[in-house]
Amino acid sequence: MSPRRVNKHVWLFLILLSSIKVYAQEVESLKPLYTDRPGQSINPYTVGDKALQIQGGYGFFREKSSLADIDLHNVDVNTKFGITDRFEFSVLFQASSLLVDRKSFLFPSDVEEDPENGLSTFSFAVRGTIMKGEGLKPAIGLEATYLATGTPGEELDNSNGRFILTLQNQLLERLSFTGNVVYYTNDRTEFTANLGFALTEELGVFAEYWPIFEARFDGESGLRFLDAYMNTGVFWQLGDNFMVDMAGGFRAFAPEYIDDSAESFYFQVGLTKRFWL
């Protein structure tokens, strides 16, 4: 075989190898991006060893009742730092704009009817992955949070602790369940149940139920149902380190709520971006 013909075959072989490599890169699975968006449930996993993750977005809540009409706009940014593969800490800031149109003397009279704008929430949290999931074995995590809230633009004078036990289980190849038990040190308890379904590797949807209780463990009161939310949404992972999301839902009031005719809904949109340090 002539040298020219050998060189020709070598070049064809190299081109074939490079095309196989490119194809392998294109079909390589996306790396998991563990974010708490959208919805209320958090997952048991951290952002990753030596990772910086920023997740945030915009939310709108509207409630109309015979007592008052309430419009609430929120913008939040949650910055997470991965210390190890199983441990992270995070800092969250939320700014809000609250507008209340008071219609009844039963509604608190000290609420301003002009928009109130400014910082409304600050939190510092640590999260650890207790057990990683594999097959039907669930992943389990625990988060502890210092939470300070207040009327937008005023002092954050309402502070308490929050503890979240989180569990996640891969029920089927494309179907997963995430559940949270949330306890606040001001005697409030919440639960979440979240079902997520992967339409494709990049695109998924979820549905979530979020009931809220007053918890007084004094042997008499126990748990008293206060409220509940239903929401659903979609998330789209664009590459290994970026995701966008959108969700919406409504508030389902407890039976003893003073205005059974009240209607409400909320909407949120946001993103998650991860950086490796």
Image: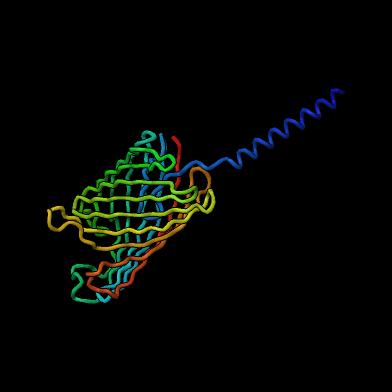
Q: Nearer the viewer, residue 271 or 12?
A: 12
Task: Name the spot of residue 63 as percent of width and height, x first.
Answer: 32, 69
In the image, is 91 to the left or to the right of 160?
Answer: right
Q: Nearer the viewer, residue 198 or 134?
A: 134
Q: Quadrant of the N terminus?
A: top right
The residue depicted at 46 percent of the width and 51 percent of the height is 175
In the image, is 112 to the left or to the right of 77?
Answer: left
The residue depicted at 19 percent of the width and 54 percent of the height is 187
The residue depicted at 38 percent of the width and 37 percent of the height is 82
Position above or below: 126 against 225: above
Q: Nearer the viewer, residue 270 or 109?
A: 270
In which quadrant of the rendered view does residue 131 lie?
top left
Task: Name the spot of residue 113 as percent of width and height, x first.
Answer: 26, 70
Q: Quadrant of the C terminus?
A: top left
Task: Name the spot of residue 190 as percent of width and height, x first.
Answer: 27, 55
Task: Name the spot of residue 81 as percent of width and height, x first.
Answer: 37, 39
Q: How many marks?
A: 0
